[in-house]
Image: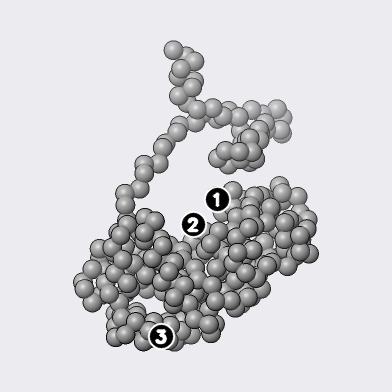
Amino acid sequence: MPEEERDGAIARQLAGWFAVAARDLPWRRRRDPYAVWLSEIMLQQTRVETVVPYFERFLGRFPRVEELAAAPLDDVLALWSGLGYYRRARELYACAREVTTRSGGRFPGGGGALRGLPGIGPYTAGAISSIAFGRREPLVDGNVARVFARLEGIDEPIKSSGAVKRLWERAAALVPEDRPGRFNEALMELGATVCTPRDPRCGSCPLERVCVARATGRVGELPVVEEKRKVPVVAMVAAVLRRGDLVLFARRSEGGLFGGLWEPPMVEAASLEGARA
Ligand code: SF4
């Protein structure tokens, strides 16, 4: 099939599938930049089911970006508590303040201007620009990368610079003029619900007939993922110090892991062993 014809078929098949298969998620009922931005930041490295109640609580408490910007940072961090990756909450707050002070609470529509805001990278910029503003901007997240690696038979390691370049080029070539946001959402949805990391449901996939991995029997081999670096494990010792009803907490320094959050006084277990020796 000629490439142009194949690209058109991919866009059509995806659109038809998404119209009936899309999950009903709260951020899909609102298409304004604030809600799209908030949901996309929360969804980074976090499961949809975990995000839903946080998204609703944030919008209940801060219905507009100006209200989020005007709140004390500690209130925002407290509401974020349990969602993890607290740097996102700090960048969310910094971004809300910048959008509010610079442009009265209006997000810019173009990907380039969005990428200049705190915490907004190419993926989030593509999501806001295409979904909220209807601009023909591509996006690639983990789900989209997996779909494209299989759909196009990309066998370079998925995080290598060569593969990343190819993925973005394919995403840019495929995103249509007409309803680009729906197309991007459909791709992400396909990766989340059908073209899953394990046991993809190729028999139910709208792209089965144009998928290179399916045609060549390489679905189980793609994407190529390099081994992850080992996560260091650090043992900590914490002291719980009480006086009456009071418990002592200290604030972590701003820069590092969990920067600015409160915790009981603690030190690395290894440093205590050193002191004892
Ligand atoms: Fe993924 Fe299978 Fe669909 Fe190919 S046919 S895009 S491997 S679910």
Kind of element beneath mark 1? loop
Q: Are marks 2 and 3 in contact (CB under 8 Å)?
A: no
Q: Which mark is residue 53?
A: none
Q: Which mark is residue 45?
A: 2
Q: Which mark is residue 84?
A: 1
Q: Position of residue 262 (x, y in %)?
A: 64, 38
Q: Are marks 3 and 1 in contact (CB under 8 Å)?
A: no
Indicate the amino acid at tag 1: Gly
Among numbered discs 3 and 1, the one appearing first in the sequence: 3
Q: Position of residue 249 (x, y in %)?
A: 66, 33
Q: Residue furthest left?
A: 217
Indicate the amino acid at tag 3: Gly
The answer as to whether callout 2 falls within 8 Å of ligand 1 is no
Residue 53 visible? The answer is no
Q: Are marks 1 and 2 in contact (CB under 8 Å)?
A: yes
Residue 277 visible? The answer is yes
Among numbered discs 2 and 3, the one appearing first in the sequence: 3
- Image quadrant where one finds the N terminus: bottom left
Rendered residue at 49%/81% (across/down): 176
Among numbered discs 1 and 2, the one appearing first in the sequence: 2
Mark 1 or 2, closer to the camera: 2
- Residue 105's quadrant in the figure? bottom right
Q: Which residue is mark 3?
A: 8
Indicate the amino acid at tag 2: Gln
Q: Please tell me which residue lies in front, 70 or 266.
A: 70
Is 60 situated above or below 177? above
Kind of element beneath mark 3? helix
Mark 3 or 1, closer to the camera: 3
